[in-house]
Image: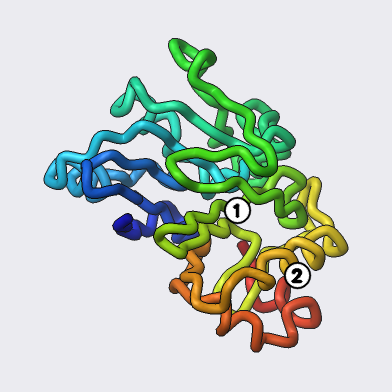
């Protein structure tokens, strides 16, 4: 399993193209409409995208979705069941806080491609892990063969996601972080913002909940 990181949108969110040696692949999160480099990479590598997987429903992780579903008409779209309403609710997806540029999913020829995912579902070899806290429907995605975990805004390098936004919960996030950090220390963490890290590096971090949402604003 191979992956390439693209940083998209005003809030510099990470989008991941992850693909196998058969040139089959998925996109994790697509937080901006500036996806030209991402599309060029997929075209050069001749990757067939079969799924677009969203770690949660905030604007900086779904803003480019309307453009992507036009480019990839056969790709299924996956989001945590509890965050599904973020497709239509500008408060939940946070677009209400950034002026008039509200996000609303274009449902034309799309509704039959939308999938609500839950704990222990599997997509493209990734096991779905229920990790509420940043949002109620936040999910992480673990691939055992590749030893990688996509964590969205649940876990970053040396930090965690903020919990002071709609449906956020510090208590739930603490439990989710404990859950993730029980995974093997050598697993590579692919976060929603910032550099990649490893589980063992984050197991050493002690001050997540004393400082995290002062230091990290995603």
Label number found at residue 67 = none
Q: Residue at x 35, y 21 (%)?
A: 74
Q: Which residue is mark 2?
A: 178
Would you identify the image quadrant in which residue 208 lies? bottom right
Q: Is residue 66 above or below residue 125?
A: above
Whether residue 73 sits left or right of residue 200 in the image: it is left
> Mark 2 and 1 residues: CB-CB less than 8 Å, in contact?
no
Q: Nearer the viewer, residue 37 or 78?
A: 78
Mark 2 residue element: helix
Whether residue 36 sits left or right of residue 26 in the image: it is left
- Seen as rendered, the residue at the extreme front is 145
Whether residue 213 sits left or right of residue 22 in the image: it is right
Q: Quadrant of the N terminus?
A: bottom left
Q: Residue at x 50, y 71 (%)?
A: 187
Query: Residue 40 at x, y = what percent?
Result: 18, 45
Q: Which residue is mark 1?
A: 140
Mark 1 residue element: strand
């Amino acid at each position: 399993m191979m992956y390439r990181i693209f940083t998209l949108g005003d809030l510099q969110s990470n989008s991941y193209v992850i693909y196998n040696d058969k040139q089959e692949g998925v996109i994790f999160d697509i937080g901006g409409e500036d996806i030209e480099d991402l599309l060029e990479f997929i075209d050069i590598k001749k990757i067939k995208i079969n799924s677009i997987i969203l770690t949660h429903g905030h604007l900086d992780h779904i803003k480019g979705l309307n453009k992507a579903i036009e480019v990839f008409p056969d790709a299924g779209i996956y989001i945590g069941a509890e965050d599904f309403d973020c497709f239509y609710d500008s408060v939940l997806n946070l677009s209400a806080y950034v002026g008039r540029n509200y996000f609303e999913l274009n449902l034309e020829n799309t509704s039959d491609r939308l999938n609500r995912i839950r704990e222990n579902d599997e997509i493209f070899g990734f096991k779905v892990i229920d990790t509420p806290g940043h949002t109620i429907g936040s999910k992480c995605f673990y691939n055992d063969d590749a030893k990688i975990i996509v964590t969205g805004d649940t876990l970053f390098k040396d930090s965690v996601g903020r919990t002071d936004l709609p449906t956020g919960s510090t208590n739930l996030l603490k439990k989710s972080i404990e859950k993730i950090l029980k995974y093997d220390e050598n697993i590579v963490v692919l976060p929603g913002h910032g550099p990649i890290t490893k589980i063992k590096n984050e197991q050493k971090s002690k001050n997540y909940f004393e400082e995290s949402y002062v230091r990290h604003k995603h």
